[in-house]
Image: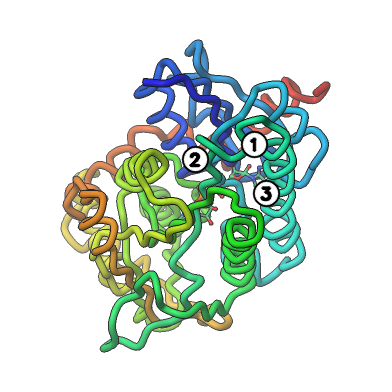
Amino acid sequence: MAKRNIVITGGAGFIGSHVVRLFVNKYPEYNIINLDKLTYAGNLDNLKDIENKPNYKFVKMDICDFEPFYRLMQEEKIDGIIHLAAESHVDRSIKDPFTFAKTNVMGTLSLLQAAKLYWESLPEGYEGKRFYHISTDEVYGSLALDSELFREDTPYSPHSPYSASKASSDHFVRAYHDTYGMPTIVTNCSNNYGPYQFPEKLIPLFINNIRQRKPLPVYGKGENVLDWLYVEDHARAIDLIFHRGKIAETYNIGGFNEWKNIDLIKVIIKTVDRILGNPEGHSLSLITYVTDRLGHDARYAIDSTKLQKELGWEPSLQFEEGIEKTVRWYLDNQEWIDNIISGEYQKYYDSMYSNL
Ligand SMILES: NC(=O)c1ccc[n+]([C@@H]2O[C@H](COP(=O)([O-])OP(=O)(O)OC[C@H]3O[C@@H](n4cnc5c(N)ncnc54)[C@H](O)[C@@H]3O)[C@@H](O)[C@H]2O)c1
């Protein structure tokens, strides 16, 4: 296997940490650089098991900072970028859209431009290079309950500031291919779940609230439908597509696994209650219906036939197994959540990197 120098942005976040772990363990000959600003969502505790590996390096950097990123590309001779860094929480985007535009749009543009200038300065140009942008199915908008799934050619129709910012960054990535010939790939994935997800997101929030006997806030009537994929299956897809995906293509990633929120919540309640030894139905009374999210999309569901047919990817876990693993992980790793809730996870790393 040829040596590669790869930057993974957002590697201290939920999905990014799984991608970093997979690449560091699977490709000892690669030089893997985890570039992350460590916002509230970045947590190096997610990577404790690989932080001392010789092929891994962490760099604290904001993707919006053009000069330092350009220098990093030169110094490390970067030939691959897997870009996951983003503001990712829809509710936060409704309160603070500017931060989403800055990081998700301008940050992505800054990485693209730095990569363009560096790669175009090399004698071999773009040969052997790759800019792989990780995006979401939310850019496609909202599906009617009885309609087809999102395909790669479904027109974009984002509704939230989060999905609008991701849609915009997807367009910039494609524009860099179409305009300058940069070898880019975009993938749009459904909702991920699994270990190390920041506990503001539905599944870890609910597991933790059940354990603490706190209310489980359900938007509207809980009728919205999401399509769920185990995070390690997403990371495997990213590995496959980074190495074998076709330049300038888009691939949808999803496990054909749609759940109405309220039904998903009942599965979580059942699983947590069983593992904690509570009687069946014990935590159903914690369900609390709250005012619906503004502009809440009715349904997301992804058609990943292209990825399955062209590259042979398929999800490895059934949903029941994935939920069981996930619930057990959060219940067994209480300290990880407690450190987040108390803010400890940031204090330690803030002091460590304050001079950089
Ligand atoms: N979570 C999902 O279900 C899902 C589904 C499809 C696509 N995605 C996409 O996958 C990517 C990762 O999502 P996630 O859920 O792991 O997000 P996350 O919020 O858990 O992690 C985001 C990471 O990006 C870092 N970051 C944020 N702003 C930065 C900046 N300006 N410079 C450098 N680093 C910065 C954060 O510190 C954090 O480590 C995002 O691009 C998201 O849009 C997520």
Relative to 186, 159 lies left or right: right
Counting residues from the N terminus, which is met first, the one under dot 3 or under dot 2? Answer: 2
From the image, state whether disc 3 or disc 1 is nearer to you: 3
Whether disc 2's CB lies below 8 Å from ligand 1 is answered: yes
Q: Residues within 10 Å of mark 3 (few under 14, many from 20)?
A: many
**Tag 3 residue:** 112
Q: What amino acid type should be assigned to the residue bearing mark 2?
A: Gly
Tell me the SS state at disc 2.
Answer: helix
| Frontmost residue, 210 versus 238 | 238
Residue positioned most to the front: 123
Whether label 2 touches label 1, CB < 8 Å = yes
**Tag 2 residue:** 16
| 260 up-or-down from 111: above or below | below
Q: What amino acid type should be assigned to the residue bearing mark 3?
A: Leu
Q: Position of residue 160 (x, y in %)?
A: 59, 75
Whether label 3 touches label 1, CB < 8 Å = no
Counting residues from the N terminus, which is met first, the one under dot 3 or under dot 1? Answer: 1
| 68 up-or-down from 163: above or below | above
Relative to 45, 286 lies left or right: left
Specify the label residue 36 is tagged with.
1
Q: Residue at x 58, y 68 (%)?
A: 167
